[in-house]
Image: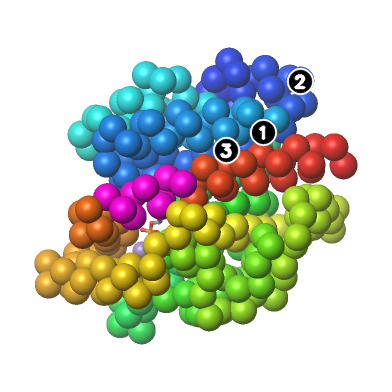
């Protein structure tokens, strides 16, 4: 069977493709495993609208009914947010979840794969997976990093949370040849805070510069993605010491409970929301909105090159 038989485009995305409009992909694990209901659905709809307001067309991606769905309806978003047993689909799970026609939410890795299949160059999310703390013991490195190394989709994020080992995550990306471009920053943003002690090699002060980097990477035939790190807006930042101590507590609880593998990131995310009394959720939503604005602007700029 041919690849297209596995893809199902929403009418909006289909029309955007036909018209050559800029399209921005969005992931669905952030909806099913990254945020509580109903804020997750609200966030998903608003982020799509922000992308439209900034001149691009949103394509939220998920696995449903044996298809890679590129662009979801409101009913699809609601299903992802409320159904039990929505699978968290990383690269290794992809063929299984499609073949067995289960409902699956795509991570950064599998959203990149779907976007590449669909001919979409840009993808907006909150945070990527990375090298976990305690990696020396567990060898837990997110498949997101391998995907960035091999799939040519630009990912706009707010850096990575300190649930991860940030310096090792940067080293890994360097080894794999993934450019990490700080948007108006020369240090890696740490998700809830706009800064960290970790210097970046590349800074861009305009969306046009980022679009030009992506275009040049394409022209050179370099495989792999570009990672754009866009700091959370100042007014939505959390206090660094406060959030770090919350994260320490969440990690300690995960250790006591013996949570590992694909369950660790969703566990930590929901624990952090609980321990901050929802403050982390508010910050998380705002940084995604900010990424949507910048991502749509980069995609629009790229389209005009
Ligand atoms: N980080 C967040 N929110 C998220 C995720 C990560 O702040 O929702 C999700 C993304 O879908 C990411 C996945 O691709 O978790 C990484 O999971 P793992 O660490 O198991 O690779
Ligand atoms: Mn892992």
Q: Position of residue 157 (x, y in %)?
A: 55, 54
Give coordinates of residue 1: x percent, y percent. Answer: 55, 28
The residue singled out by tag 1 in the image is 54
**Image colouring:** rainbow
Q: Which residues are magenta?
A: 278-286
**Distance between mark 3 and mark 1 Cα atoms:** 14 Å
- State how far apart marks 1 and 2 are (Cα): 17 Å
Which residue appears farthest toward the bottom when viewing the image? Answer: 136
Q: Nearer the viewer, residue 93 or 231?
A: 231
Residue at 71 percent of width and 41 percent of height = 297
Q: Nearer the viewer, residue 303 or 238?
A: 238
Tally the numbered discs. Answer: 3
Q: Is residue 31 left or right of residue 157?
A: left
Q: Residues within 10 Å of mark 2 (few under 14, many from 20)?
A: few
Task: Name the residue that disc number 2 marks.
Answer: 19
Question: In what element is the residue under mark 3?
Answer: strand
Residue 289 image position (x, y, % from top left): 52, 42
Q: Nearer the viewer, mark 3 or mark 1?
A: 1
- Helix, strand or loop under label 1: loop
**Do the numbered discs 3 and 2 sit on residues whose CB atoms are within 8 Å?**
no
Q: Residue at 53%, 31% (x, y): give it.
A: 48
Q: Indicate the quadrant containing the C terminus: top left, top right, bottom left or bottom right.
A: top right
Earlier residue among tags 3 and 2: 2
Is there a contact, CB below 8 Å, between mark 3 and mark 1?
A: no
Indicate whether 128 appears above or below 54.
below
Residue 194 placement, left or right of 204: left
| Mark carried by residue 25 | 3
């Amino acid at each position: 069977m041919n690849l297209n038989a596995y893809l199902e485009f929403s009418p909006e995305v289909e029309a955007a493709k036909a018209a050559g409009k800029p399209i921005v992909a969005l992931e669905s694990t952030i909806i099913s495993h990254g945020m509580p209901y109903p804020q997750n659905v609200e966030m998903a709809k608003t982020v799509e609208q922000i992308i439209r307001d900034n001149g691009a067309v949103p394509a939220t991606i998920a696995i449903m009914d044996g298809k890679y769905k590129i662009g979801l309806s409101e009913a699809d978003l609601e299903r992802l947010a409320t159904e039990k047993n929505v699978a968290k689909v990383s690269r290794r799970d992809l063929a299984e979840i499609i073949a067995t026609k289960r409902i699956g939410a795509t991570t950064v890795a599998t959203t990149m794969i779907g976007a590449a299949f669909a001919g979409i160059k840009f993808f907006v999310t909150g945070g990527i997976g990375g090298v976990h703390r305690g990696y020396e013991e567990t060898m837990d490195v997110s498949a997101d990093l391998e995907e960035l190394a091999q799939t040519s989709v630009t990912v706009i994020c707010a850096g990575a949370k300190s649930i991860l080992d940030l310096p090792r995550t940067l080293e890994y990306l360097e080894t794999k040849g993934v450019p990490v471009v700080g948007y108006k920053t020369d240090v890696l943003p740490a998700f809830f805070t706009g800064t960290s002690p970790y210097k970046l090699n590349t800074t861009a002060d305009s969306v046009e510069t980022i679009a030009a980097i992506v275009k040049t990477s394409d022209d050179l035939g370099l495989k792999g993605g570009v990672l754009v790190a866009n700091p959370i807006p100042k007014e939505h930042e959390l206090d660094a010491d406060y959030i770090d101590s919350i994260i320490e507590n969440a990690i300690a609880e995960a250790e006591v409970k013996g949570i590992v593998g694909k369950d660790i990131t969703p566990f930590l995310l929901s624990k952090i929301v609980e321990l901050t009394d929802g403050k982390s959720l508010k910050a998380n939503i705002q940084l995604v909105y900010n990424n949507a604005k910048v991502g749509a602007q980069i995609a629009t700029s790229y389209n005009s090159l």
